[in-house]
Image (cartoon, rainbow, N blue to C red):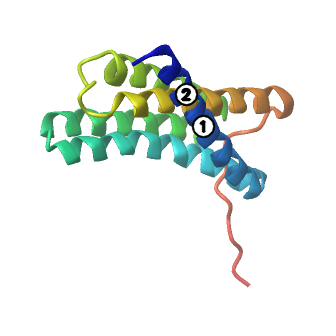
Amino acid sequence: MSQLHLVIFLLLGVVAGGIFLLYARAQGDLKERLVLASGLIVAAVIYIGFGLVLGDVYWVGIEAAGVVFYTLFVIFAYRFHFWWLAIGWLLHVAWDVSLHLLGPGAHIAPAWYAVACIGFDVLMAGYILIYLSKSKPEPIRVPHETVS
């Protein structure tokens, strides 16, 4: 992949992340956090889809373990503090690079997708860290609906 393609795909990931953030912000403060948390799990689940399309059962298992791993960060964000979610997004960058861009799982996802995912993940983590530095949010709380 040329440097130009690398930059283009990173920027595409950032643009997709920007659209996702606009959607998340439009949901309101509490639901925004839920959207960001759900997004981390979906980002991991997408790689299972690539493994299924290829019929690579071994990698489907590895990707499923990744879903469990990233779900733990969502649980920690719910239980302890929202910054756990930023850590999860940052670690997903490492997953993208070490497994799917440069590592043994490079055959699972197209290189362009792994690069775009890096741009997306970095934007999510950066947004959460900036948001944290300004608002110091508590753990994510699931909205409770009252029955009238």
Is there CB contact under 8 Å for labels 1 and 2? no
Q: Which mark is residue 77?
A: 1
| Percent x, y of residue 111 | 36, 27
SS at mark 2 in the image: helix
Q: Is residue 103 left or right of residue 81?
A: left
**Quadrant housing residue 44:** top left
Q: Quadrant of the N terminus?
A: top left
**Distance Cα–Cα, label 1 vs label 2:** 32 Å
| Percent x, y of residue 130 | 77, 27
Query: From the viewer's perspective, is residue 48 above or below residue 4?
Result: below
The residue at 52%/19% (across/down) is 4
Query: From the viewer's perspective, is residue 6 above or below residue 9?
Result: above
Q: Is residue 112 left or right of residue 31?
A: left
| Residue at image mark 2 | 8
Q: Which mark is residue 47?
A: none
Asked whether the viewer can see residue 9, the reply is yes
The residue at 36%/16% (across/down) is 98
The residue at 45%/41% (across/down) is 43
Query: From the viewer's perspective, is residue 34 above or below residue 99?
Result: below
Disc nearest the viewer among 1 and 2? 2
Question: What's the residue type where badge 1 is placed?
Answer: Ala
| Percent x, y of residue 91 | 49, 23
Observer-nearest of 132 and 95:
95
The residue at 55%/23% (across/down) is 90
